[in-house]
Image: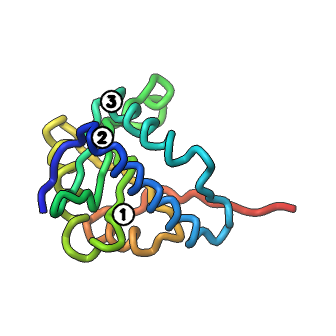
Amino acid sequence: MKIIEYEDVYLEDVRDLLVELEEYIVTIDEDNLDQVGEEYREKMAIFDLKEVKENNGKVYLAVENDNVVGLIMGIIRHFDEVDYLDYKCPHSGVITEFIVSKNARNGGVGTMLINKIEEYFKLCGCEYIFVDAFAYNKNAIKFYQNKNFHSRMYSMIKEIK
């Protein structure tokens, strides 16, 4: 297993992993709001990679036997004048996408990826790492908690008819 920085030759692998992640999210979404739109596969990876490039970010891939089995994307968080009115705004990294293919889970791949992005954020002078976890993704929440992440905010939803 090796962790490498993203190269364009791996674009289709990134697309595959992002679709796998979103399809999984659809299956656990108890609100039935998530979907894999028609253009998701084509556009989401491009959108994510652009965000990484524009925000001093990195994409790392886990490669085993020439197969990409995981990815993590992260950006450096930017604040504006309004943010500073009520927040200290520490220099922070944000994990924007993170997936280990279902066939490679529980083998340490996720730990290697998160360690790599944390190392990058430290090199950039970040003091914190932020990540959003889908509330119904209990496995992801447990993984992050085991890596010493904790909840800071809750996003709540209520259906109204």
**Local secondary structure at mark 1:** loop
Amino acid type of the residue tagged 3 in the rendering: Lys
Q: Nearer the viewer, mark 3 or mark 1?
A: 3
Amino acid type of the residue tagged 2 in the rendering: Ser
The residue shown at (23%, 48%) is 60
Residue at numbered disc 2: 92
**Local secondary structure at mark 3:** helix
Left or right: residue 78 compared with residue 129: right
Q: Is residue 10 above or below residue 154?
A: above
Closer to the camera in the image, 26 or 82: 26
**Local secondary structure at mark 2:** strand
Query: Residue 111, position in %: x, y?
Result: 21, 65
Callout 2 crowding tier (Cα within 10 Å): few <14, some 14–19, many ≥20: some
Query: Residue 24, position in %: x, y?
Result: 50, 67
The residue most toward the top is: 81
Q: Is residue 76 above or below residue 151?
A: above
Callout 1 crowding tier (Cα within 10 Å): few <14, some 14–19, many ≥20: few
Marks 3 & 1, CB-CB < 8 Å contact = no
Which comes before the other along the chain, label 2 or label 1? 2
Quadrant containing the C terminus in the rendered view: bottom right
Quarter holding residue 67 = bottom left
The residue shown at (77%, 63%) is 159
Residue at numbered disc 1: 150
Spatial CA span between label 3 and label 2: 16 Å
The residue shown at (38%, 30%) is 78
Which comes before the other along the chain, label 3 or label 1? 3
Residue at numbered disc 3: 53
Q: Nearer the viewer, mark 3 or mark 2?
A: 3
Query: Residue 117, position in %: x, y?
Result: 22, 49
